[in-house]
Amino acid sequence: MTPAPTQQEKARRLRALHVEPTILVLVNAWDVASARTIAAVPGCRAVATASHSIAAAHGYDDGEQMPVDLMVAAIARIAAAVDLPVTADLESGYGDVAGTVRAAIRSGAVGGNIEDAMKPLDQAVRAVEAAVAASHAEGMAFVLNARTDAYLAGPPETALADAIERGTAYLAAGADCVFVPGCTDPDHIRELAAAFGQGRLSLLGVPGLPAPAELETLGVARVSYGPYPQRWALVALTHRAEHLLAGGG
């Protein structure tokens, strides 16, 4: 029997997946059952958590409304349930970026997102620096996916320039990749990939985003699907429940 990979081995694997020729596709999980289901699908190379989905499963709204200890406990259960690398959605750090990153690492995660919520750039850079320092203190090659909300919360006319400015600053502060949810324009995607370099650009799979194969040609390193997998599952459950409650077999 092959021994399960260590956390350090998972961390190195996740880092390597960002620079492989094939784009890293992450289908987000929200509990042990979804994580095991996703991990068992051929071609799955890593698992990502979705804070929105985990919060919803526990009866909380998104946006750090779920207590951080409950979120970390959910991440720990997911990380323990699969042998693949797990990268965690850590929102904005729950008021303590360093402490949250340390807790995520101790829970078994080997990567994580920290979002800027379009805070002043100097504050956002300090958050990235705190996350990087925390991972170093834990002795973990944690893959930090620094998220900018330039396309979600900033002026549309400056979204590309703002994302490049912020993403470049986050990479200089030690982030491993830059997550730019909301960007779907192929020309913008190409510019972002060129600005950040190989293996650096991460996108959110929203309606209107090109398929992974096309994203790969544009220079995207990874694409994740956030709350959508849970929504797809609940739509399927709704349809089945409607069928059964209508007398179907």
Image (spheres, rainbow, N blue to C red):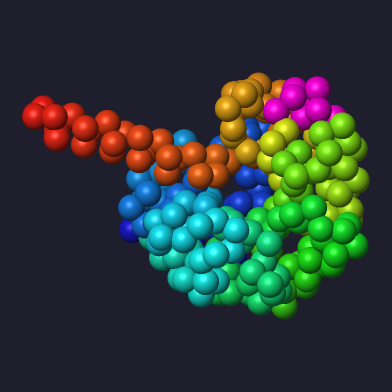
Indicate whether residue 105 is drawn in magenta: no
Residue 165 location in percent, x, y? 90, 45
Q: Quadrant of residue 218?
A: top right
Q: Is residue 40 visible?
A: no
Q: What residue do we see at 79% from left, 63% from top?
A: 128
User: On the picture, is 231 further left or further right than 113?
Assistant: left
Q: Quadrant of residue 1?
A: bottom left
Range covered by the magenta-colored residues: 184-191
164 above or below 72?
above
Q: Foreground: 192 or 109? A: 192
User: On the picture, is 75 further left or further right than 146?
Assistant: left
Magenta: main secondary structure equals helix
Residue 60 location in percent, x, y? 46, 61
Residue 232 location in percent, x, y? 40, 36
Q: What residue do we see at 44% from left, 55% from top?
A: 56
User: On the picture, is 130 further left or further right than 76?
Assistant: right
Q: How many marks?
A: 0
Q: Is residue 71 visible?
A: yes
6 above or below 146?
below
Q: What residue do we see at 80% from left, 53% from top?
A: 118
> In what quadrant of the picture does the C terminus appear?
top left
User: On the picture, is 51 further left or further right than 117?
Assistant: left
Residue 248 location in percent, x, y? 11, 27
Q: Quadrant of residue 37?
A: top left
Q: What residue do we see at 55% from left, 44% from top?
A: 226
